[in-house]
Every structure is written in structure tokens, then in C-alpha cells.
Amino acid sequence: MATEEHSPGEHSPAEPESSLGAGDAAAPAPADSAALKDRIEALEQELAAAREQELRALAEVQNLRRRAERDVEAAHKFALDQFVAALLPVVDNLERALAAIDRSGEQGQALAEGVELTHKSLLDVLRQQRVEVVDPAGGSFDPALHEAVAMVPHPEVPANGVVEVLQRGYTLHQRLVRPAMVVVSQGAPAAGGQG
């Protein structure tokens, strides 16, 4: 068996370093320990602050993402808003034409049927796009959906009831495109009122 030879300055791996003193491996001095504790506390505070900033940044990014999604959804829903508003006078004109047609003759009947079919077809297309009619006939006045153009005393309709609908309103995805124009009741005239 061969023996390992070492030069005079080398130590074998099994031999402990004899040049180390007994006190060299001792714990750091108390002053150093207090400074290390202070440093650790400062680093922990910095870490906590960094974590809080990270959480706030993540929350802000999530809020921005949700807001952007809502904006895109609203843009898709209400992209037709102006187009629908432009079509509503056509619907009104068809309704006026239907009211003006004399249906007593055969030609009048045929004309009324044609206009009714066109009117129904247009309303069907609008409904497919989530356009709904606001027709408050017989209901109560709602300032969110109706525009009062006049108030009249009416013996049979209670106060704030709709007496007459001059023009129907419309909503798109439950958002008002055009309010209904209505005449509102003031209620029954006061007995003994001046006339």
C-alpha cells in the first residue's frame, strides 16, 4: 500500500488545522449582534413594504383590466346607439302613415297592410339588436324614461299618470336612447275652481 506524501506546508484532510486558535470560531461580539438584529429588522420592514406595494400594484392592474373589459363590453353593446337613434324617426313616420291611411277602400286596406308589414319588420330588426319600446300608455310618469311636454287636469287619470303618449321612447340594452314624450295628468280639477 502506498503512503501519501505531503509537503511540509500541507495538511492532510483528516488533520485539523492546527493554526486556528480556540477563540477564533467564537460568536460575534455583542455590538455586532445588535447591529445585525437592527439590520434584519430594517430588511424585514423593507420586505413588508415591498410586498404591500406589489399587492397594491396587482390590485390596480386587476382593476384596470376589469375597467377595460367593461369599456369594451359597453362599446360593443352601444355601438349601435347613434344608428338606432337615426332609425327611430323612420319608425315614427311609419306609425304616422298607418294612422293617416284611409282603410275604407280596397286600395287603402292593401296600402295599410304593406305599411304594417314594413313597420313590423323594422321593429323586429330593432328587437333583435336589443332595442325595446318604451310605451307608458296608462302608466305613471317616470322622469328617467319619459319627457313630459304638458300637464293637464284630468278627472279620470290620477296625478302623475300618463294621459297621452305623443311619441314612444326606446331603450338599447336597457339604456335610454330616446325618452317617450307624454302628456301628464295633474289629477282631477279642484271642485269650485275658477273657470
Image: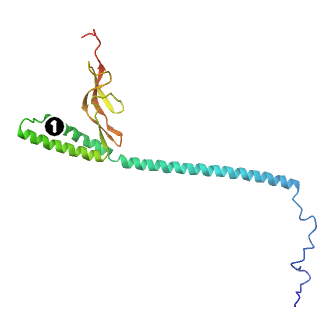
Mark 1 Cα shell of 10 Å, populated few (<14), some (14-19), many (≥20): some
The C terminus - image quarter: top left
* Above or below: residue 32 compared with residue 155: below
Lateral position of residue 169 relative to residue 119, left or right: right
Residue 61, image x and y in percent? Answer: 54, 51
Counting every numbered tag in the picture gives 1
- Left or right, residue 14 beside residue 146: right
Question: Is 67 on the left or on the right of 79, as rendered?
Answer: right
Q: Position of residue 192 (x, y in %)?
A: 27, 8
Residue lying at 16% horizontally and 34% vertically, measured from the top left: 99
Camera-nearest residue between 34 and 130: 130
From this view, report whether residue 14 is shown above or below residue 144: below
Query: Which residue sits at x=58%, y=50%?
Result: 57
Residue denoted by label 1: 98
Which quadrant is home to the N terminus? bottom right
Give the farthest residue toward the top: 192
Closer-to-camera residue (32/131): 131
Query: Percent position (x, y) of residue 146?
Result: 32, 31
Q: Nearer the viewer, residue 158 or 4?
A: 158
**Quarter of the image holding residue 162?**
top left
How far across and how far down the image is residue 164, in percent? 25, 27
| Kind of residue indicated by mark 1 | Leu
Find numbered disc 1 in the image and state the secondary structure of the residue it sits on. Answer: helix
At x 50% / y 49%, what residue is drawn?
A: 64
Left or right: 58 with respect to 107? Answer: right
